[in-house]
Image: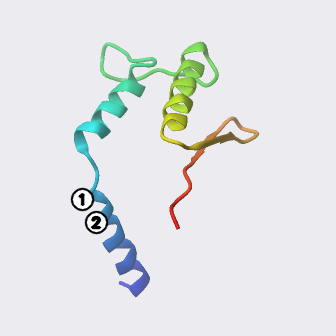
Amino acid sequence: MTQQDQLAQHAAEQAQDHVNNDRLQAAIAALAAFGGRDDGGVSRETLTDIDLAARRYLVEQARALGCEVSTDDCANLFFRRAGQA
């Protein structure tokens, strides 16, 4: 394993230690509610009313966290939150 790989692995392990699992699971469940199926799966076809509602939800959540929101020509969402100096 290279030194760069070791540094990346260490950073990933540190980040994992700071993840609030309950909050992460709640966020996943909230998004899965958009198009959720009875079998536990999600059906959310691109640019349908359900997909657009899910996108609006994500944008609202991102902006509430202070993120800048942008999209590309393929309608991919990008969220950016500036770091601290």
Image quadrant assignment for residue 14: bottom left
Q: Determine whether 17 is above or below 35 in the image.
A: below
Q: Image check: 72 left or right of 45? A: right
Q: Residue at label 2?
A: 13
Residue 85 spot, x, y in % from top left: 53, 68
Q: Is residue 18 left or right of residue 7?
A: left
> The residue tagged with tag 1: helix, strand or loop?
helix
**Marks 1 and 2 in Cβ contact (< 8 Å):** yes
Residue in front for this viewpoint, 38 or 27:
27
Q: Is residue 77 left or right of residue 19?
A: right
Reading the image, the residue beneath label 1 is 17
Element on which disc 2 rests: helix
Identify which amino acid the numbered label 2 is placed on. Glu
The picture places residue 68, in percent across and down from the top left corner, at: 62, 44
Compared to residue 68, the image places residue 64 above or below, namely above
Instruction: Say which quarter of the image contains residue 74.
Output: top right
Please say if 59 is above or below 50: below
Q: Residue at x 35, y 84 (%)?
A: 1
Q: Using the numbered discs, state the Cα–Cα distance from disc 1 to disc 2 in whole angstroms.
A: 6 Å
